[in-house]
Image (cartoon, helix red, strand yellow):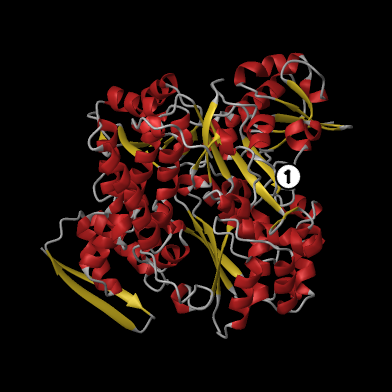
Amino acid sequence: MLHLIKFKYNNEHTLIIIFIKMNLSESQRVTIEEHVETFLKKPGALLPLMHAIQDSLGYIPEDSYPIISAAFNLSIAEIHGFVTFYHHFRTSPSGKNILQVCRAESCQSMGSDGIESYCKKVLGIDYHETSKDGAITLEPVYCLGNCACSPSVMMNDKVIGRITPEKIDNIIKAAK
Amino acid sequence: MAYKIYIPIDSTALSLGANDVFEAISAEAQKRQINLNIVRNGSRGLFWLEPLVEVETEKGRVAFGPVSTNDVEKLFDNEFFLGREGELFLGLTDELSWLKNQERLTFARVGITDPLDIADYEKHSGFKGLKNAIKLEPQLIVKEVADSGLRGRGGAAFPTGIKWQTVLDTPSKTKYIVCNADEGDSGTFSDRMIMEDDPFVLIEGMIIAGMAVGAEYGYIYLRSEYPDAQHVLNKAIKIAKEKGYLGSNILGSGYNFDLEVTRAAGAYICGEETSLLESLEGKRGMVRYKPPLPAIEGLYGKPTVVNNVITLATVPIIMDKGALFYADFGMGRSKGTLPIQLAGNLKQTGLIEKAFGISLKELLYDFGGGSFTGKPIKAVQVGGPLGAFLPEAQFDTPLDYEKFSEINAVVGHGGIVAFDDATDMAKMARYSFEFCAIESCGKCTPCRIGSTRGMEVIDRIKEGVDQDKNEQLLRDLGETMVNGSLCAMGGMTPFPVISALNFFPKDFGLEKKETSA
């Protein structure tokens, strides 16, 4: 498949890029191009750009790299290196919800080990995996800043303190 | 007339159901046709009592807590909104010993005001420091901060005045203020509280920093695990712009300053200042060599102040009350106050701002009330995952940068995590290496590879394989990492590991006597 992509730059130049082999859906491609255009002139664009793509699509498709590569004059290796450096970014879709379990010291002192294994057991998955029904992706996290009420988990954007297996059950039930 | 009620919106209070309590109280008030004026304040920092509901009375604010939705009916039956004694009644908030025994300077407003009410901020001495700073030459602002003795509260404790002076003295048309809000240390939450509960104080501190060194743009590099802080900061920045505190010609002073929040992406190493700058520039967060110092060649090669949230948020009170007022608190070369965060296995956890010099013992037992589980406290870790584990024999150590340094420990960002006697310290030491392996940027070999080899050596010691040889190997590895790493990640990971080995050899299966402190 051949794609022609244009970016306005400084209102004077037009950047034209030609690609082959892109397995993005049309809407994904449009979204990525819109975000690229938004951040094209911003210093340090890669960080907010990747957030924007992941917030819109749920992940950063590796097939977006050629577009970003051409727009920012970076190699695909540099973009891959950037994305994989940061734990927050993912290159494949997650489940409907992301459950992050804090593994840091404060939570450990209050028994987070037990919470970790409980989550893995009831969901039947390990970290970085998604439950069979697609409802929950389980991720470790290193501190949520809720250390006064350990152990803690974060369900999507919501932190829950003094977590217990019962509270985990409720979270999972609500996510189904 | 409406009764004034305070229900916190701080994310720890929310993590314990403060929003549900807010909704239940609102609904019950409507049902009983009682007119309430509910303010969503920050947290007072007594997290074991959250959600803490306060009622304004003639004598001052009285507290009820911890309140759950099940308590709401009973509270109304007892007419709590009149501040009447009854179930969950704790008395006047300011008279609670936890708060009464603190010296709140940086946190003076936290929990008292509505975080996004700029008029409330101004009423509580907000922007006074900025207004004083506007009247001063940049050099005099820097001198005031230097004279206060303020040191970097992020962990490295570098004198803020010297850093600012270097940036001021480095000629450049473009300079930057970067706020390090990548608070990744376990056991710390004071940055988060400032950003969520009193965001204008951070903005004010950054504006003053900009005036002092000649910078017109700032970034707050905020960890992605703090979505609530991000929302609050973005709203606060918008409000500050509308009120003329940010933008061109601030309050008619001729100074310009603007700032934005940049969301990080979950890499612990980006709390290290040079790695943070790389990340802000849109690169992998690889640690840079120093020199050049960021103060001379920082963001995009320009002179840059990189300060922690608490450091910047402390500047307004210094500029308001004067350097000497601030320097009067503390001991030795640790001047002023430190926001201490009690966390982990303690009965009473939360935020305590105290002058330097308070002992761990006072913090753990007088403030903390001992362990949550009721078992003896076996060890504490101060200063995050790179801080040493301290045994009970060292609990008399006063919180002071130099005193901690003498016992190979760090005050760091002031986070204290307590562990009870069920804790396996060899497991904690192994975790320190595991964390280092996960979070290392990979630039230095001792950190990148030593962390994984370290886990394996600990495993062998625990399995009883060549224990003497492997113990020596572990100590050698520690020395290599300390001396052969560019930054604190590899350079300090051995602190918790070796301290655990020294003080709790039995947990490693080593039959030696416990080393005395």
Q: Is residue B272 left or right of residue B6?
A: left
Q: Vertically, is A43 above or below B389?
A: below
**Residue B318 point in image, percent of width and height:** 75, 61
Residue under mark 1: which chain is it in?
Answer: B
Q: Quadrant of residue B82?
A: top right
Q: Is residue A60 left or right of residue B152?
A: left
Q: Vertically, is B202 above or below A124?
A: below
From the viewer's side, name the closer residue of B168 and B265: B168
**Residue B232 point in image, percent of width and height:** 58, 50
The residue at which mark 1 appears reads as B113
The residue at the point 47 percent across, 41 percent down is A144
**Residue B173 point in image, percent of width and height:** 56, 84
Q: Amino acid at mark 1?
A: Thr
Looking at the figure, which quarter contains the C terminus of chain B? Answer: top right
From the viewer's side, name the closer residue of B187 and A92: B187
Q: Is residue B408 left or right of residue B288?
A: right
From the viewer's side, name the closer residue of B305 and A56: B305
Q: Vertically, is A121 above or below B352?
A: above
